[in-house]
Image (cartoon, rainbow, N blue to C red):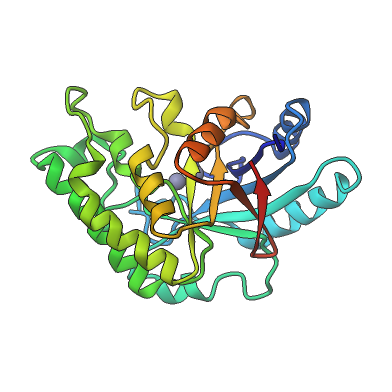
Amino acid sequence: MNRPADYHIHTFFSEDSDESPDNIIAKAISLNLKCICFTDHNDYDWPVIDGKKEFSLDYPSYTKYMEKLKFKYKDIFPVYIGVEQGLSQTSADLINNYDQDNFLDFIIGSSHLVYGADPYEKEFWTGRDIDKSIGDYYESIIENLMVCNNFDVYGHLDYITRYIPDKTYKYDPNKYMEIIEVILKKLIENGKGIELNTAGLKCQLNAANPDTPVLKLYRQLGGEIITVGSDAHKADDVGKFHDKAYTLLKEAGFNYYTIFKRRHPEFIPL
Ligand SMILES: [Zn+2]
Ligand SMILES: [Zn+2]
């Protein structure tokens, strides 16, 4: 089996991480990973809280720092540089014109908000129907796909299910398969991929994001581009559950996983 590549990692350039990139690389080397890609957050539409705009990446500092880091490890360990871009209709122009100088290796397009509201917050769910909120989340993804094209894979497609506060609620992806199929077809048609995000495997969901039925459908529809990422916000989580992820991929009919260099996909045999 090929060594794992972790293509979704946050550092202290993300609002919700304090981890140093050097610690992350040390962990990746200790795990004998094939390579890693940093993907710090950039969300243009994050609600302003206490006058502070969160999750806005300082792109010049980030690229300068990461370029040096890449150089520092050039003979030791392969490091790639990406961004996890929050997709939205309202900021489509900014998103589509991001990284004009083609510095980045990889862009994950993600939805962390449902029409501007944050499902991570408990208040989001107050007075909302759970099924309808999940449906709205998928609707918003379709709308994002109509206008945003500057990304390589769609991140954690069923992200919203991580934060349903009612722990007795059992998310069933089959209930949303019709709309998910529309999303997957649109991604394939646009030459984009998805990611298998392993973060759900460590929390109570005990399922990857997206869940197995969605991985299978994507493959059946002809989807080939699929990266694997831990969504680590600390060094301890780097490379987590990649073995399990590759087993899930094989079960879903994939023979390869994908990495990106300078925005071009490379297919690595499983
Ligand atoms: Zn994310
Ligand atoms: Zn992330």
Q: Name the residue located 9 percent from the left edge and 42 percent from the top edge.
A: 129
Q: Nearer the viewer, residue 235 or 184?
A: 184
Left/right placement of residue 256 relative to residue 50 reads right
Residue 24, image x and y in percent? Answer: 69, 34
Camera sees residue 245: yes
Residue 50, image x and y in percent? Answer: 35, 47
Left/right placement of residue 54 relative to residue 14 reads left
Residue 57, image x and y in percent? Answer: 55, 56
- In this view, 11 is above or below 204: below
- In this view, 256 is above or below 242: below
Left/right placement of residue 248 relative to residue 183 reads right
Left/right placement of residue 267 relative to residue 121 reads right
Q: Can you say which quadrant of the picture contains the C terminus?
A: top right
Camera sees residue 232: no
Which residue ends up furthest to the right in the rendered image?
A: 75
* Image quadrant in which you'd find residue 140: bottom left
Q: Nearer the viewer, residue 101 or 256?
A: 256
Residue 104, image x and y in percent? Answer: 66, 62
Q: Can you say which quadrant of the picture contains the N terminus?
A: top right
* Image quadrant in which you'd find residue 173: top left
Q: Name the residue located 78 percent from the left edge and 31 percent from the top edge.
A: 29
Q: Nearer the viewer, residue 137 or 69?
A: 137
- In this view, 94 is above or below 109: below
Q: Name the residue located 29 percent from the left edge and 34 percent from the top edge.
A: 163
Q: Nearer the viewer, residue 131 or 183?
A: 183
Q: How many numbered marks are there?
A: 0
